[in-house]
Image (cartoon, helix red, strand yellow):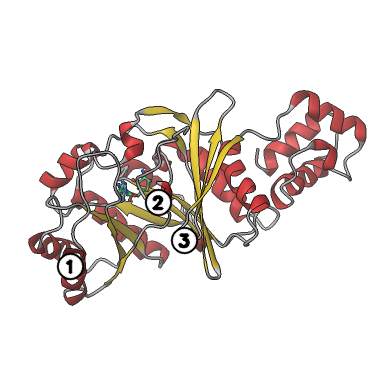
Amino acid sequence: MNQAELQSLCIEAGESEFRGVQLFEWMYRHGIVSFDSMLNVKKSFREHLKEHCIIQTLQVEKRIKSKKDESIKILFRTWDNHFIETVSMANGDRHTVCLSSQAGCALDCSFCATGRQGFERNLSTGEIIDQLIFVRENIDQPITNVVFMGMGEPFHNYNNVLNASDIFHSPKGFNLASTRITISTAGLLPQIKQFISEKRRYKLAISLNAADDRVRNDIMPINKKWPIAELVNAGKEYSNQKKRLVMFEYVLLKGINDSENHALQLAQLLQGIPCKLNLIPYNETDGIYQRPEEKVITRFSEILYENRNEYLVLVRWSKGQDIDAGCGQLAGQKI
Ligand code: SAH
């Protein structure tokens, strides 16, 4: 619940509106997980809350730490037995938390482990927020960034993702700057347009993964509905309006989208588009794809770098690959 919803809950129970603000702060600023810890809320109302409300939506099943870097993957179970994963990535002063927005995913991108699992259901706003509360309460380093790049397609769960983001951003909640919250989409055009027209201030990332519609149709079936040119245009509109650069993600798949020609095509596509480009070397899942050799990755990024005018290029080496916590490796595995 956001603050307005908590306030109406309080009013309906005969309490003052201000109680709603207190509940909001207890839950999101202090991250308490029991009604009894709400010290400035009178006992009779705490009893009422215990009887009618749930304050913790997720159960922790497993927590795995990478041996190679500082990342930690947490497996949660929902009340109705769905499994979702969250990844905490600490790196120097930066601590980024990668959140899931759905159990499973409906999009069926051929290279992604979550996609192969099929769609189960949307996560509630509470289930999204509880992932972050758990990390904040259990991992020492202060959280600096949140990315919706875990399981699911955030824009298929638009309202809950945006509701949760607003609570992360609220000074009485998690107090994270809007520039530190990134929502990544596989390219749902109507929701991207909605996001722009609502003047949402969070960062937008679009998983492009190909510069050619034939290639993208093959690996991301959603492309048949909303092809590359429309996504790039929408990204441009976001960058221009927000003065905040859209990010395009591009997973490098050996023999599929990693040739010098593909790089030139991508460079051409992004000419004149103010954006950041994130190249993601493919992480192994049990699918059919492979990561290109390092020299191919380097050459690909050099071509983009040499041809760039308005965009910035960055190669993103995923963290936590040894614990299957890299991009595209989350599948809610129980063991
Ligand atoms: N559904 C959203 C949010 C997931 S973000 C989206 O598609 O944007 C996960 C990112 O990891 C996406 O950019 C996706 O293209 C990328 N990805 C998926 N599988 C991957 C894999 N096996 N290796 C590397 N990146 C992958």
Cβ of mark 2 under 8 Å from ligand 1: the answer is no
Name the residue located 42 percent from the left edge and 40 percent from the top edge: 151
Q: Are marks 1 and 3 in contact (CB under 8 Å)?
A: no
Of the residues shown, which amino acid type is indicated by label 1? Lys
Classed neighbour count for the residue bearing mark 3: other residues with Cα under 10 Å, few (<14), some (14–19), many (≥20): some
Q: Is residue 267 placed above or below 192 in the rendered structure?
A: below
Residue 32 lies in what quarter of the image?
Answer: top right
Name the residue located 49 percent from the left edge and 32 percent from the top edge: 83
In the picture provided, is 211 more to the left or to the right than 163?
A: left
User: Could you tell me how far apart the alpha carbons at marks 1 and 3 are, in whole angstroms?
Assistant: 23 Å
Specify the label residue 295 is tagged with.
Answer: 1
Instruction: Residue 136 in the image: state x and y as whole percent.
Output: 64, 53
In the picture provided, is 143 more to the left or to the right than 256?
A: right
N-terminal-most mark, 1 or 3 = 3
Specify the label residue 69 is tagged with.
Answer: 3
User: Could you tell me how far apart the alpha carbons at marks 1 and 2 are, in whole angstroms?
Assistant: 22 Å
Classed neighbour count for the residue bearing mark 1: other residues with Cα under 10 Å, few (<14), some (14–19), many (≥20): few
Classed neighbour count for the residue bearing mark 2: other residues with Cα under 10 Å, few (<14), some (14–19), many (≥20): few
Instruction: Residue 118 in the image: state x and y as whole percent.
Output: 34, 28
Q: How many marks?
A: 3
N-terminal-most mark, 2 or 3 = 3
Residue 217: tell me if it is visible.
Answer: yes
N-terminal-most mark, 1 or 2 = 1
Residue 149: tell me if it is visible.
Answer: no
Name the residue located 13 percent from the left edge and 50 percent from the top edge: 256
Near-viewer residue (284 or 305): 284
User: Could you tell me how far apart the alpha carbons at marks 2 and 3 are, in whole angstroms?
Assistant: 9 Å
Specify the label residue 322 is tagged with.
Answer: 2
Instruction: Residue 285 in the image: state x and y as whole percent.
Output: 30, 42
